[in-house]
Amino acid sequence: QLVESGGGLVQSGGSLRLSCAASGDDFNKYAMAWFCQRPGKDREFVAAISWSGLNTYYRNSVKGRFTISRDSAKKMVYLQMNSLRPEDTAVYYCAADGDAPLATMTSAPYYEHWGQGTQVTVSS
């Protein structure tokens, strides 16, 4: 089970940190990812981190602004979001599944486990 938190309303240029709490014994075997979804749009890849935490991947538009990290002892995954823009407004979802090639890890249909989502709204 995955439970996101940390969303909210923030002004353009501001920061938020999203958290994803995982339960179960397999957390440390899973790659973790964040996706976002805007109304009427498909779920889009934002960032992913390998099971070891050694490899991270980002969508081009968030590189240098967002940072994904994990704390295996706490079974937590985080998304630090800085320099937020109005176009970052979306529902953000945490996802988990086994490690895979990068092209697979950036694809929403690959992931079996999802959280309920947390709303991020960036005002201009």
Image (cartoon, grey):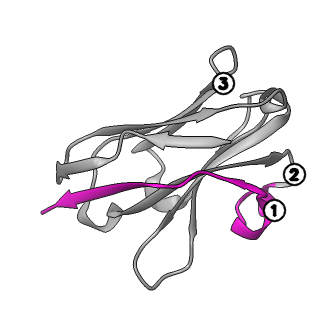
Whole-percent x and y of residue 7? 34, 46
Q: Amino acid at mark 2?
A: Ala
Q: Is residue 115 left or right of residue 101?
A: left
Specify few, some or many for label 3: CA neighbours under 10 Å numbering under 14, 14-19, or 20 or more.
some
Give SS at disc 3. Answer: loop
The residue nearer to you, when weighing 103 against 5, is 5
Tell me which corner region of the image, top left, top right, bottom left or bottom right, holds residue 122. bottom left
Magenta highlight on residue 58: no
Q: Which residue: 20% across, 51% down?
A: 9
Q: Is residue 112 left or right of residue 35?
A: right
Disc 2 + disc 1, Cβ < 8 Å: yes
CA gap between label 3 and label 1 equals 23 Å
Q: Amino acid at mark 1?
A: Thr
Q: Which residue: 44% across, 85% down?
A: 40
Above or below, 19 against 108 in this view is: above
Q: Quadrant of the C terminus?
A: bottom left
Whole-percent x and y of residue 123? 15, 60
The residue nearer to you, when weighing 59 against 18, is 18
The disc at residue 100 is: 2
Q: Residue tagged by mark 3?
A: 75
Q: Which residue: 50% across, 43% down?
A: 4
Magenta highlight on residue 103: yes
CA gap between label 2 and label 3 equals 20 Å
The mark nearer the N terminus, 3 or 1, is 3
Above or below, 52 against 118 in this view is: above
The disc at residue 104 is: 1
Give SS at disc 2. Answer: loop
